């Protein structure tokens, strides 16, 4: 029985995301994705104009969610800004594990992608994690949290159940940023 166009599209996206997360964007060919999705390369190209369009469609939901987080914390200051940003970033990382992994593991490639505003969002996240401080210790701690949350949340290993992992990631990130929850 033939799959519907939307089912085929969904399978192609799922295969692309899984393969990109494992082999990277450059390390995955259209043929790899088509084979994994159980379709021909021609069928894949019928649904998506190329690998870049697949990448864009995969990352836009995570990008939009991060932009929404940054909008939500835009007016906050001090501890509330840092706490809300940490909680939001941890939640996004756990929700979009493979997308975040793909985004940060190949940040150079992603930052050059014309349909994504990766560097602007990463800078906004870093600034919010630092409490908008330009002081070097705050910036270094923010960089550490930015990287550690992504690495911990995007791991394939089951470190702990998600609720335990979430709580510990938030606690550790706030401690690294020298903040205690209000």
Image (cartoon, rainbow, N blue to C red):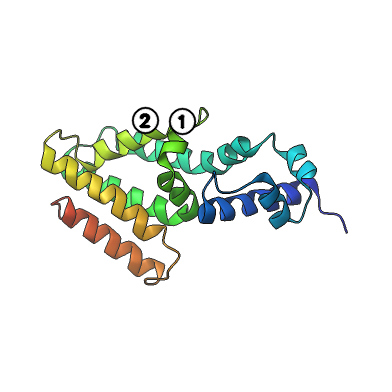
In the rendered image, residue 93, in percent from the top left (x then y), is placed at 40, 52
Residue drawn 79% across and 48% down? 40
Depth order, front residue of 30/172: 30
Residue 80 to residue 117: above or below: below
Residue drawn 37% across and 67% down? 163
Q: Residue furthest right?
A: 1
Residue 122 picture quarter:
top left
| Element carrying mark 1 | loop
157 horizontally vs 73: left or right = right
- Per the image, the residue denoted by label 2 is 120
- Per the image, the residue denoted by label 1 is 112
Residue drawn 55% across and 48% down? 27
Residue 15 to residue 78: above or below: below
Residue drawn 59% across and 39% down? 57
Residue 182 in sight in this render: no
In the rendered image, residue 170, in percent from the top left (x then y), is placed at 27, 58
89 horizontally vs 156: left or right = left
Within-10-Å neighbours for mark 2: few <14, some 14–19, many 20+: few
Depth order, front residue of 165/16: 16
Within-10-Å neighbours for mark 1: few <14, some 14–19, many 20+: few
In the rendered image, residue 180, in percent from the top left (x then y), is placed at 15, 55
């Amino acid at each position: 029985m033939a799959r519907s166009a939307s089912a085929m599209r969904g399978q192609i996206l799922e295969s692309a995301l899984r393969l990109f997360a494992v082999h990277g964007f450059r390390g995955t060919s259209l043929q790899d994705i088509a084979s994994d999705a159980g379709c021909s390369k021609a069928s894949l190209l019928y649904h998506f104009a190329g690998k870049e369009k697949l990448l864009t469609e995969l990352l836009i939901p995570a990008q939009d969610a991060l932009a929404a987080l940054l909008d939500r914390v835009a007016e906050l200051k001090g501890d509330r800004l840092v706490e809300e940003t940490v909680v939001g970033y941890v939640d996004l990382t756990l929700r979009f594990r493979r997308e975040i992994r793909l985004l940060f593991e190949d940040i150079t490639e992603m930052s050059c992608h014309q349909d994504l505003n990766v560097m602007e969002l990463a800078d906004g996240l870093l600034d919010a994690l630092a409490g908008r401080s330009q002081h070097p210790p705050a910036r270094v701690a923010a960089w550490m949290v930015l990287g550690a949350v992504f690495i911990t949340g995007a791991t394939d290993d089951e470190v702990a159940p998600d609720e335990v992992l979430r709580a510990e990631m938030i606690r550790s990130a706030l401690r690294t940023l020298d903040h205690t929850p209000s």
